[in-house]
Image (cartoon, grey):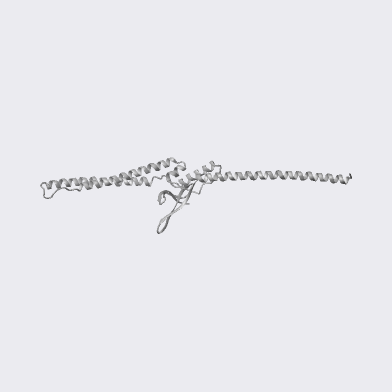
Amino acid sequence: MTKLSMLAIATLVSFTGRAAAEDAADDKTAAAVKAALAEDRKERDARAEAEARYKKEAIVFTDVYFGNESGVRGRALVPYRNGRKLEVVDFYDAVGRSDLSATYRRRTTYAWISLGTAVALEAASLVVMTKALEDDCEALEPGFDACFAAAEKRQAKGLKLSLGLAGGGIAVMFVGIAFLRYRISTSENDVHDMADHHNAKLRQKHGLPTAGLRPRLQQVALTPYVDTDGGGLAIGGRF
């Protein structure tokens, strides 16, 4: 074998070795890329599942416009969770404020008791007045004057009692209206802050990045409302 042949064989062996090494490195790199892609896909799937679970429990607000035939008169925000409109007590319970929901329930109970009492007092006032105005004295019968004088006294006493019952009913009615009017003790940014903190805790629970709090509102009006679908908590405000 000539020196030239030996050199050619050595060169071929060297090239074959380098090619094999490069192929092995390429295979290793491809495997690493495949593993990284699989891990990334797994993380994205896990994140998507976590986002889906979060959205089922998170509280969001939807714009509601209300008004009359002359046009829109206002705008409100209604809280929803998992596509379901939240009532006042449901919202408070959802954000972990059972004390506020208890206050709302208690004031609502007091309000309806007061309004029911007011109706009863007004009904009693009408009954007493009707009884007081009854007159069974016969003009041509003996003792008419005495009967008429007694009837006048009875009527005056009955009318005083009737007016007292009516006045008491009106006073109790205003108490009931006040309980209804002020049964929601939340003001300003409290509702938005409670929803934001609730959602932030949910994101931590599901291992998601914590979203920043929404911009604070300068003014918020919080009132219950009733529509054809029922009622709920209406939150109106401006930034």
| Residue 99 image position (x, y, % from top left) | 43, 40
Q: Nearer the viewer, residue 31 or 153?
A: 31
Quadrant location, the N terminus: top right
Location of residue 92 by image quarter = top left
Residue 209 visible? The answer is no
The residue positioned farthest toward the bottom in the image shown:
70
The residue positioned farthest toward the front in the image shown:
1
| Residue 234 image position (x, y, % from top left) | 43, 49
Q: Is residue 119 left or right of residue 150?
A: right
Q: What residue sits 88% from the left and 45% below the top?
A: 3
How many labels sit on residues?
0
The residue positioned farthest toward the right in the image shown:
2
| Residue 42 image position (x, y, % from top left) | 61, 44
Q: Nearer the viewer, residue 207 or 172?
A: 207
Q: Is residue 35 left or right of residue 153?
A: right
Q: Is residue 152 left or right of residue 226?
A: left
Q: What residue sits 37% from the left and 46% below the top?
A: 180
Q: Nearer the viewer, residue 147 or 7?
A: 7
| Residue 74 image position (x, y, % from top left) | 43, 54
Residue 32 visible? The answer is yes
Location of residue 150 by image quarter = top left
